[in-house]
Amino acid sequence: MIEARGLSRSFEGRLAIEGLSFLVPEGKLCALLGPNGAGKTTTVRVLLGLLPPSAGQARVAGFSLPGSAADGARLRAQAGLLTEAPGCYDRMSGRENLELFGRLYGLSEAKLRSGLEHWLRRLELWEARDQPFGTYSKGMKQRLALIRAVLHEPRVLFLDEPTSGLDPAGAREVRDLIADFRGEGRTILLCTHNLAEAETLADLVGILRRRMLAFGPPASLGAARPALEVKLAGDAETVVAGLAALPAVQECSAHGGVLHLVVAELERDTPLVVREIVRHGGQILWVRPAGSSLEEIYLRAVREESA
Amino acid sequence: MNRVVLGLFLRKEVRDLRSNRQLWPAYLLLPVVAVLLPVLLLAFLPMLSDPAQSGNDRVVQILIESVSNDPTIAGATISERIARLLLRDFGMFYLLVGVILASGAAALALVREKEQRTLEPILATPLHDRDLLLAKLVAAVGPALAVAWASMLAGSLAGALMGRWVIGQWILPTAGNWVAWSLLLPALVSFAALIALRASARFTDVPGASQFTGLVVVPLALIVVAVLGRPAMASPAAGIIGAAGVALLSLWLFYGNVRRFRREEILTKWR
């Protein structure tokens, strides 16, 4: 389980994350979405006990943060981390890299041996185990880094951009593995830019831009704010003021000829909106419900935060 | 102290050293010099101690005067006395070998992990800061000491053989030499490595850490070697006292390094 309560972290007075509160229950996968610099990596580092929070608390795998150095070490023994860069030693073979990290995690010789063979075979790296890591392809490197993250059978996994820079086939392989990890009952926090990846894998989605802009199951994020988009011929700005005055319209904004409206109830309010646009002289090209895809929810949340 | 972790990092560094041919010259050149120099010094000994060949060279005169008046140097002839002085004081070179190699390795110890992006996965393991820094220290100091001691044994053997051949005497290391090599050398090497290790934790690029070590740490260590080395070579008691002082200083530096090790600076200021 991962629980954050009002978690903040600042660097030299600049807030990287602010007041994050969320709960990822045991065995669930939470995708943390956000643009570059949104604070995803900082969140992972704070939750893993690598950085102390400036404010707030967290509880990860049963350990409280901030906590003692000994608790921090015990927490890290229960957690696995996949960093954005694979972070293995180029001159050492894949097997030697895993042996080094397995021993740093305190695995016994027998567990290390059986774990190595199991994971290397499962991720199809067994044949390449004695080749130097530096000679691996990008996909192989990422798979080896994934093995390193799970070799000690952690209860909690932090995956920071696991498919970044991989070709579609490699990304698919890694996504399948993450789905397997979730099936094994691990609690997973997945930081990603890839909205489709989050939509496919996640039980919960958090949209982060320093603050948590939205958090919940992907379906409920869309359902919570019924919205529609209207494409107009010409400038959409001219009708914004008139629409905003309608009681049914909770929010109204225009971006490049497309009106984005949050309404109280989609089926009831759509005809009202259309009539009002026409009354203001707007020429409608199309109307469609918005907010159903994660991409739209994400873009809206980030856009609203920017505004 | 986690012995498993110490062993892991020591093995990793030695493996890295073996596979990285760019590092070989540093580890090979100094031992070669350490063996060749005493041979060359003794090869020119007949010229030095022969007034017909050295003439009125002021430096040679001073050398002859100093060995004649130094009660710690025994010898039936001036040549033997000069040979004993040269080989005894040349023992300081082995201190330098250890200091240079250890500080060079320690300067890269953390900054190279940052550059390879391997530091964050290491920090994400249950490893304590103290164990990580101790492991990095041992990994820098271990190979440097091994090379310095091997150089010392080979150089001493070469010096003894050369002494036998040139002046007909076996010139063996003094008690001061042995004390300095066994006690002062590990203390000095640790001292230099600890300063370089702190630089390695603070720098964000390998050239910066290497330059700082080359321009600040090594010269500083050389001054300490120069100040402590000669008295230590002449007197075992001075060697023991010097080694104890430097060891205490190293201990203080080590715990200072542990206290000042900032994961957040290492993780957030590195890009």
Image: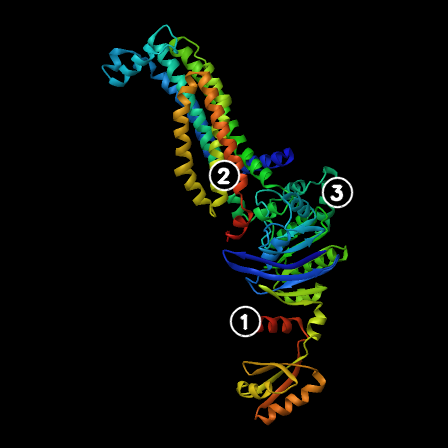
Q: Secondary structure at mark 3?
A: helix
Q: Is residue A217 left or right of residue B183?
A: right
Between B179 and A109, the residue placed more toward the observer is B179
Nearer to the camera, B97 or B124: B124
Residue A138 picture location, percent across and down? 60, 54
Question: Residue under circle 2?
Answer: B197
- Its colouring scheme is rainbow
In the picture provided, is B230 more to the left or to the right than A175? left
Q: Name the front one of labels 2 and 3.
A: 2
Residue B150 visible, this angle: no
- Find disc 3 in the rendering and name its residue: A114
A218 or B211, which is in the foreground?
A218
**Picture disc at residue B41:** none
Residue B51, x across and y down, in percent: 26, 11
Report, in whole angstroms, how far the alpha carbon at label 1 lies from the one at label 3: 50 Å
The residue nearer to you, when weighing A245 against B91, is: A245
Query: Marks 2 and 1: CB-CB under 8 Å?
Result: no
Q: CA distance from mark 2 to mark 3?
A: 36 Å
Check chain identity for marks 1 and 3: say if they share one.
yes
Residue type of the residue flagged with mark 2 = Leu
Marked residue chain, label 2: B
**Residues at discs 2 and 1 both on one chain:** no
Q: Chain of mark 3?
A: A
Cβ–Cβ below 8 Å for labels 2 and 3? no
Residue at mark 1: A306
Foreground disc of the pair 1, 3: 1
Three-letter amino acid code at the position of disc 1: Ser
